[in-house]
Structures are given as structure tokens and as C-alpha cells.
Image (spheres, rainbow, N blue to C red):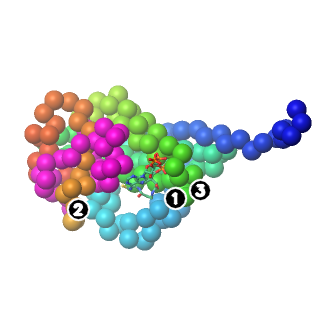
Amino acid sequence: MPGFPMFMKKHDLVYLTEDASHDAAIEIINEEAFGPGRFARAAARIREQGPHDLSLSFVCADDGETIASVRMTPVMAGSIKGHLLGPLAVRPSHKNRGIGRELVRIAVEAARRKGSECVILVGDPPYYQPLGFEKVAYGALTFPGPVDPNRVLVVPMTEGVHEGLKGDIHWRA
Ligand SMILES: CC(C)(COP(=O)(O)OP(=O)(O)OC[C@H]1O[C@@H](n2cnc3c(N)ncnc32)[C@H](O)[C@@H]1OP(=O)(O)O)[C@@H](O)C(=O)NCCC(=O)NCCS
């Protein structure tokens, strides 16, 4: 086939459940995406209270290199047993290929299968609303640090979630 290279570089993206071998790469991805201020964010304070759930956390690898990550942490949000999604980060070299959206979709579906009542996050509504996230009632949840109430979003997975999302949000076992 003239003019067609025999060995074109082919991106081979795979989505994997996170394990300890991904830790170092995820740290670099999050440092690159959020910088040193990331530990001061209100959602990060919840994540400091206990471990994330590896079985609901995922990475994307390109030819074996970890290039994106999403983590999920079990939380009690008012009276609702849910999961906090984040951080979500994709390396700049791999942005705008749908990887972030796919990681969110996989994580939300995994949480649903595990019987979670909701997935909550603090993020940009224009990105997350098309993925099924809805605004939580303004100021209804109290985070362990300041958040913009307009950015607190939820995918409800059982009846009565919005009514139950009132009060503190914190890590749960
Ligand atoms: C936000 C982020 C995870 C998106 O990942 P991604 O794989 O590039 O995103 P996708 O390919 O799934 O989606 C790309 C689309 O989302 C849009 N988008 C990206 N960030 C957005 C934002 N903050 N608000 C609204 N839209 C956004 C892009 O413009 C693009 O739109 P298009 O499909 O109309 O062209 C990635 O840019 C990133 O790691 N950013 C730095 C960390 C961060 O902000 N994380 C989210 C915390 S809330």
C-alpha cells in the first residue's frame, strides 16, 4: 500500500481499576493538574479523613503509561451513604479525547452496582451536568472547608437523595 506507513503509532487506551502500583503516577497527574494548593480544597479535607475505595477508582493507561485518574471516597452526606468523586485529572497530552467523561461514567456505574446511594462532587456544572449530575440544594451540605455551593453536584441513585442531602459531609467506613 504505497504512501501508508506500516507501523503507525496507535494509541491503545485501557481503563483499569486502580491498585497500589498506580500511586506514583496518580500523584504526578494530580500535582500537574491541581498544583500544591490541592490539599487545601474542601473535598481534599474529606479525602484526608480516610482512604478512597480502590474498587471504585480507575485509571486510564496509554500503551502501559497511566495518563488519567479518578478516585472515589465513601462519604456520609447528611443521611445519604454515597461516594465523593475526585480528583479527576487527565494529563494535558491526552485532554479532549473523552477520557475524563469515560472515567466519570465508569466510576458512577461502578458505584451504582455497589449499591451507593449517590455520587457527589465539587466541580464545574457545564462539564458534569451532561454526565447526569444535578445541583445540590444551595448550601444544604456543609463541607470541612469553604466550597462554592453552586459547584456541589450529585447523581442521585435512590429515591429521596436530594431530601437527605442536608448537614455535614464526611468520610465513612
Ligand atoms: C477537566 C478534565 C478532567 C477533562 O478531561 P478530558 O479528558 O480532557 O475531558 P473530555 O475529553 O471528557 O471532555 C472534553 C470536553 O469537556 C470540556 N471541558 C473541559 N473542562 C471543562 C470545564 N472545566 N468546564 C466545562 N467544560 C469543560 C472541553 O471543552 C471539551 O468540550 P467539547 O467536547 O465540547 O470539545 C481535564 O481537563 C483535567 O484534568 N483538568 C484539570 C483538572 C480538573 O480541572 N479536574 C476537574 C476537577 S472538577
Instruction: Determine if the C-beta at disc 1 is less than 8 A from ligand 1.
Output: yes
Q: Earlier in the sequence, mark 3 or mark 1?
A: 1
Residue 136 x, y percent position in the rendering: 18, 47
Residue 85 x, y percent position in the rendering: 34, 47
Q: What's the amino acid at mark 3?
A: Ser
Pointer 2: what residue? 147
Q: Earlier in the sequence, mark 2 or mark 3?
A: 3
Asked whether the residues under the numbered discs 1 and 2 touch, taking CB atoms below 8 Å apart as contact, a structural biologist would say no
Element type at marker 2?
loop
The answer to whether residue 44 is above or below residue 101 is: below
Tell me the mark number nearer the camera, choosing from 3 and 1.
3
> Which residues lie in the magenta part?
118-144
Q: Nearer the viewer, residue 120 or 148?
A: 148
Q: What's the amino acid at mark 1?
A: Ile
Q: Nearer the viewer, residue 164 or 21?
A: 164
Pointer 3: what residue? 93
The residue shown at (41%, 48%) is: 71
Tell me the mark number nearer the camera, choosing from 2 and 3.
3
Q: What is the number of the mark on residue 29?
A: 1
